[in-house]
Amino acid sequence: MNQSRRDRYRIRNPSFSSSEMNFARGSHSMGCEVRYFNHQMQHNYLSVSLKRFETAILVFYFKFILSFNEDLATQAYHIFAMACYFTPVLGAILADSFIGKFWTILSISCIYAAGNIILSFASISGTSWISFFGLALIALGTGGIKPCVSAFGGDQFLPGQERQLQQFFSLFYISINSGSLISTFLTPILRQDIHCFGRQDCYPLAFGIPAILMVVALILFILGRFITGYIIHPPQKDNIVVTVCCCVALGNYTIKPDQIQVINPLLVILFIPVFDYLIYPFMNTIGLNKPLKRMVIGGLLAALSFGVCGFIQTQIEMEEPVLMLKNQNHLLLYNGLEDPYSFQNETIAPQSLKKFINLDRKMLTEIFDLSPNELKNDQTLIIYYRSKNENPMKMVFENVLVKPEKGGAKIFTLFELKNYDRQPFFVPGKDPLIESIVVGNYSKASVGYLRSFEIDVTGNPIMISVDGQNITYLTLQQGATYFQLIRGDLNKVTKKIKQLVQMNDLIVCEIQALETNIIKIVDENKLSVFLQLIQYIIMTSAEIMFSVTGLEFSYSQAPKSMKSVLQAAWLLMIAFGNLIVAVIADLKIFNEQSYEFYFFGVLMLVDIIIFAIMSYFYVPLENVDDDDGIDSEFYLFGANHC
């Protein structure tokens, strides 16, 4: 029987008269627009929460709150990302075979919101197991949302509205990246610039706002069910995935590091109209008008972006400090004498510092009379000559030839202060205090050092204080590491300040009583972070040609019983991609990050060549819904509002 879709609806819905059915179809265009905008409003809030966790803030949380090392933080992040893109398979099966897309989105969103709330509270105390419990709920909730939202939106369109369907998936992608744009820009500000619970950050707020927005999105989604009405397809009990599983069972403003990712969603929003109205029409004129051809070109661009990324990373690595070799150590020798000092055929001027890289550990222990176990790997020996009549001060620091972890300026400090009684060093307006360690007392002067600390470089003068006295730094540079020697008499400073106040004179010389000699030992960043624009432009173009086109193509080719499953399969590939990254990070196959980027570029190239060959032999299906023999019935909820 070759009944028209209208006749099939009339036969299966006896409660609709023919005229009523025609009215419903005639008014559907306006009704679906209303439902679409309600759906997009809900998804805009939703995408703030979803895309929020795809930024580097989670890595920062693992490193600085849960105290993970860099490799473990990277692994944990990618395992979480893998879970987010793996669980959609479960959500898709639940939607297509059991309770439908609407009820799947509604019920699983509650789990997702609960995960957001738990993570926000867990970040107050930094409790690992509670944090991971919240992340597990978020990953599980993502599985019920990601594949169903796009498929549920596609369900709102009838045959003959293919152009509107294409626009929907374009606007759908803009909606996702609008949320990502807002959250990627604002979340690092909430994390770092706002202080709460006695800390210099506010992860509870950064995680809490997405939780609030998720609850708002859930309320909007529920209201849309009653106000505008949704077209809700009943679940297909004969879902092929369930059947197969059963068979198997039976058998000046300084941009923050994690804000640079705001470029991607911004470019997506700008590029989609450009591609729809300029690039795609041009491609159609030269025969590149098929979805699979666009996806192949997108994949090639993705491979190219990895190559560009690898090249930029190579330039960054050339600026990195020299790595400390095994059984060798760096040496910093400070000559505090009035005469030059010679070491290893190098002359060190008075009141200056000289660094020696990768010296043999045995030689250092012999020259400076150290015990065999006093120096270990990744440690730097500090030698301070303060007087001809005294042996030099010997201190062991962590590796000092390193870049700052948080993008500011890192400072290692040695001090020689008279009348110092362990008064705290600190950066005004910030906690915690900088820990000081006294290693000796000479003629009422205490000699020691401070734990290394990092200062944000904002373009304004930077200060640290001790006993109420400020030491001002005017020229610290972003990405640089410094070594400083602070000398003076704290009592002399205090008396001088009192005298000046009593004379009603201006206090203009208060820091002169503390002599500060600061020396740069690791150069600042010379490459602009905005060089990443090149790779972002290429990668965003690839994302639009591959992802947006692929979403529409996979939906159009899927039978009705597998609409969400195909979306989940699409996301499942991202899960495997994150798994590959996590495995490679754990195996530490590559010594340099640039090699890893080149590897991914080659992997992408090989992958897209295989995809191109498969695409050449693929025959697209037409009118899938009419030919798959699956019930095409739909229900209009709240039709009186259409």
Image (cartoon, helix red, strand yellow):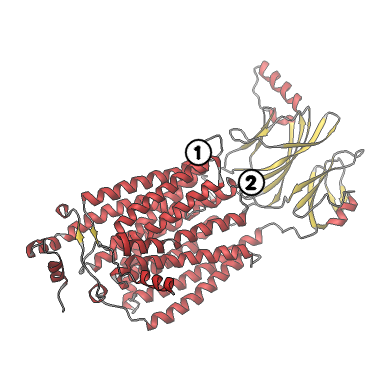
Q: Which mark is first along the chain, 2 or 1?
A: 1
> In the rendered image, which residue does mark 2 sit on?
409
- Farthest right residue in view: 389
Is residue 604 placed above or below 413 in the rendered structure? below
Location of residue 434 by image quarter: top right
Residue at 13% x, 60% y is 24
- Farthest bottom residue in view: 617
Q: Is residue 423 left or right of residue 12?
A: right
Q: Is residue 254 visible?
A: no
Image coords of residue 498 (percent x, y):
69, 19
Q: Is residue 313 visible?
A: yes
Is residue 250 placed above or below 530 in the rendered structure? below
Q: Is residue 149 left or right of residue 86?
A: left
Nearer to us in this view, 630 or 595: 630
Image coords of residue 79 (percent x, y):
53, 59
Image coords of residue 50 (percent x, y):
41, 53
Q: How many marks?
A: 2
Closer to us: mark 1 or mark 2? 1
Q: Secondary structure at mark 2?
A: strand
Q: Is residue 108 left or right of residue 18?
A: right
Q: Secondary structure at mark 1?
A: loop
Residue at 29% x, 48% y is 220
Nearer to us in this view, 446 or 142: 142
Image coords of residue 621 (percent x, y):
29, 78
The quarter of the image holding the N terminus is: bottom left
> In the rendered image, which residue does mark 1 sit on?
194
What amino acid type is highlighted by mark number 1?
Ile
What amino acid type is highlighted by mark number 2?
Ala
Is residue 442 placed above or below 323 in the rendered structure? above
Residue at 42% x, 47% y is 114
Q: Is residue 216 left or right of residue 420?
A: left
Location of residue 265 by image quarter: bottom left
